[in-house]
Amino acid sequence: MDDAVDPAGMISPPAAPAAGRRRRIAARTRLDFWFDAVLLLGFTLAYSYGFTGIGIHEWLGIALGAALLLHLTLHWDWVIRTTRKLVSPHGPDKLIYLVNLALLVAMTFCVASGILISRVALPSLDIYPLTGPFWTEFHFKTADVTLFLVPVHVALRWRWIVRVGRRLLTWRPVRRPG
């Protein structure tokens, strides 16, 4: 397609792609979407203790702890930007930030207390952590808080999830110029 010339003689860029064309999705956006989907699936499986049994529950919990650190690392730029914006009185980022912070604290305590009460994963490595009713109850409470916050987190990011999900999961033939 040739560049158009406007009345002032300036060359304007080619027109935007037609409405039916698919825009490319950045590799980082694809990574975020699929990593988040795997985290959600892992969390759902880990919380389904009756389905997975204690061994898978514990190993999956440890893996989710590591994945949580990776997730935080991948989104560290967002954490810094949003923390700086918190001083401004507007925007939905404050609520998202507070929910994410509460989720981070709850999941960290849940994973840490889960490690402390491990009956299969760590003993299989000859590591015998502390046990006791306090840590067991603390683990259950932080798991309940996490279970409440994960759907809130998903709901607050729903528009992004749907937008990216549609672009990733909708098959459209790509037209080749020619």
Image (cartoon, grey):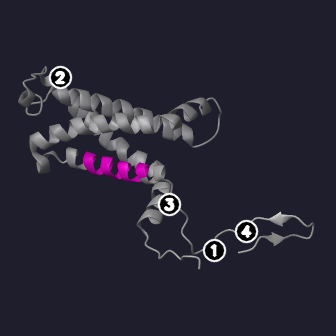
In the picture of the structure, the residue carrying the numbered disc 3 is 163
Disc nearest the viewer among 3 and 1: 1
**Residues at badges 3 and 1 in contact (C-beta under 8 Å)?**
no
Residue at (35% x, 33% y) in the render: 69
Q: Looking at the figure, which quarter contains the C terminus?
A: bottom right
Q: Which residues are magenta?
A: 31-43
Q: Secondary structure at mark 3?
A: helix
In the picture of the structure, the residue carrying the numbered disc 4 is 14
**Amino acid at the residue labelled 4:** Pro
Location of residue 177 with respect to 84 vertically, above or below:
below
In the picture of the structure, the residue carrying the numbered disc 2 is 134
Q: What is the distance, in whole Å, between disc 1 and disc 2 at their CAs? A: 61 Å
Q: What is the distance, in whole Å, between disc 1 and disc 4 at their CAs? A: 11 Å
Q: Looking at the figure, which quarter contains the N terminus?
A: bottom right
**Amino acid at the residue labelled 3:** Arg
Residue at (40% x, 33% y) in the render: 102
Q: x, y (%) of residue 161?
A: 45, 56
Disc nearest the viewer among 4 and 2: 4
Q: Nearer the viewer, residue 48 or 33?
A: 33
Q: Nearer the viewer, residue 130 or 171?
A: 171
Residue at (6% x, 31% y) in the render: 124
Q: x, y (%) of residue 75?
A: 46, 38
Q: What is the distance, in whole Å, between disc 4 and disc 2 at their CAs? A: 66 Å
**Amino acid at the residue labelled 2:** Phe
Q: Nearer the viewer, residue 61 or 31?
A: 31
Dot 3 or dot 2: first in sequence order is 2
**Mark 2 residue crowding within 10 angstroms, few (<14) / some (14–19) / many (20+):** few
Asked if residue 121 lies in the magenta stretch, the reply is no
Dot 1 or dot 2: first in sequence order is 1
In the picture of the structure, the residue carrying the numbered disc 1 is 18
